């Protein structure tokens, strides 16, 4: 039996994750020499080197890789244990790791407010990123729950649709097309278009529609964030297609107009998903229930104009239905 302390394992895990003693020390609020002493002692206990240093970077040896995956299992088990104990005591406590696509950053924090009030013992980490990076997080099993707009074939997920996420054509208020009705989609060919970055789910959905309809917009600008695109639209640099959720605060009362273009809105939905092979923590299960129960009413309040389909009709029409698991009640 190896004589290692939990503290040493934590220090080792952080060092392995960052590939650096210095960054691990920063994360753990320790000094760099403390971190390297802990790793040295652990190496001695294991009896084999755990890292190789090449230049300034640290690489895990084979023994180091095995120890890292053992550490991850231990920490996950302990987290789960802690939460089960809190549950037995009748308290909802622990950590919730959420990763959401960029369009959900307007909505999810508003839902977290009442959730945190109801369960003050839950700490939340919220990661906002695009479709592609979210898939990478799933593959690395980094989070408890994911909010996505497109369901990947891999990894295997439990998926629950919960709200519409329509994509609309957004222009500045004074735009000549803003007062027109039933604008043919070909009209977009004449407009400078601002596009999201490669890897964005919004971009994929827009490109798919344009390909189907044989539309060749002039991409005048490519930007990696919905907010930057909104500023560019307001600044008169062009029009774009964004989720209606991105104008949750201002609506169309200020700088933006939604153009009534044929083929729009592109009907999409948000799904909340978790890895099928991973047991949900009590805290994650609690948030999942909260999200499914509370989000329709909150969406009606925040975005009264959002499409009318509800999650029941979605569930019936979704091809992923077979993958969905009934929620525990
Ligand atoms: P994106 O995702 O940030 O990858 O465009 C948003 C969405 O798919 O709704």
Image (spheres, helix red, strand yellow):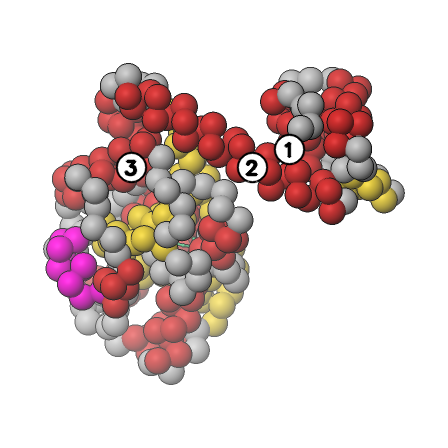
Going from N to C along the chain, the mark reached first, 2 or 1, is 1
For disc 3, the neighbor class at 10 Å (few under 14, some 14 to 19, many from 20) is some
Q: Where is residue 36 in the image (x, y as percent from the top left)?
A: 78, 24
Question: Can residue 257 be seen in the rendering of this structure?
Answer: no
Q: Name the residue under label 1.
A: 13
Q: Distance between the Cα atoms at labels 2 and 3?
A: 21 Å
Going from N to C along the chain, the mark reached first, 3 or 1, is 1
Image quadrant holding the C terminus, namely top left
**Splitting the image into 4 quarters, where does residue 18 fall?**
top right
Q: Mark 2 points at which residue?
A: 72
**Splitting the image into 4 quarters, where does residue 93 fall?**
top left
Q: Distance between the Cα atoms at labels 3 and 1?
A: 27 Å
Beta carbon of the mark 1 residue lies under 8 A of ligand 1:
no
Q: What stretch is highlighted in magenta?
A: 309-318
Instruction: Identify the main secondary structure in magenta.
Output: helix
Could you say whether the residue bearing mark 2 is in a helix, strand or loop?
helix
Left or right, 316 with respect to 75, comes to left
Q: Distance between the Cα atoms at labels 2 and 1?
A: 8 Å
Q: Residue at x 76, y 44 (%)?
A: 61
Q: Position of residue 180 (x, y in %)?
A: 21, 66
């Amino acid at each position: 039996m190896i004589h290692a302390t939990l503290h040493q394992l934590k220090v080792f895990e952080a060092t392995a994750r960052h590939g650096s003693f210095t960054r691990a020390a920063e994360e753990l609020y320790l000094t760099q020499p403390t971190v390297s002493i802990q790793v040295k002692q652990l190496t001695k206990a294991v009896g084999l080197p755990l890292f190789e240093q090449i230049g300034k970077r640290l690489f895990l040896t084979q023994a180091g890789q095995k120890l890292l995956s053992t550490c991850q299992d231990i920490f996950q088990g302990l987290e789960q244990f802690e939460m089960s104990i809190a549950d037995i005591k009748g308290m909802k406590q622990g950590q919730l790791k959420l990763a959401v696509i960029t369009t959900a950053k307007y909505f999810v924090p508003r839902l977290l407010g009442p959730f945190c009030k109801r369960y003050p013992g839950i700490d939340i980490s919220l990661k906002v990123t695009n479709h592609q990076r979210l898939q990478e997080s799933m593959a690395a099993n980094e989070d408890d729950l994911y909010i996505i707009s497109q369901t990947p074939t891999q990894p295997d997920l439990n998926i629950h649709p919960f709200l519409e996420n329509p994509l609309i054509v957004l222009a500045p208020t004074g735009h000549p097309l803003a007062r027109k009705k039933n604008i043919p989609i070909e009209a977009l060919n004449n407009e400078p278009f601002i596009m999201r970055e490669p890897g964005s789910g919004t971009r994929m959905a827009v490109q798919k529609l344009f390909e189907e309809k044989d539309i060749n917009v002039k991409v005048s600008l490519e930007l990696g964030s919905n907010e930057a695109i909104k500023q560019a639209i307001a600044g008169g640099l062009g029009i774009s297609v964004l989720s209606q959720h991105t104008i949750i605060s201002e609506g169309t009362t200020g700088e933006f107009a939604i153009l009534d273009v044929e083929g729009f809105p592109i009907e999409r939905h948000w799904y909340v998903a978790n890895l099928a092979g991973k047991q949900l923590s009590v805290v994650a299960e609690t948030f999942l229930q909260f999200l499914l129960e509370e989000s329709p009413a909150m969406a009606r309040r925040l975005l009264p104009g959002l499409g009318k389909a509800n999650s029941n009709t979605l569930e019936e029409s979704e091809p992923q239905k077979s993958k969905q698991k009934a929620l525990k009640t």
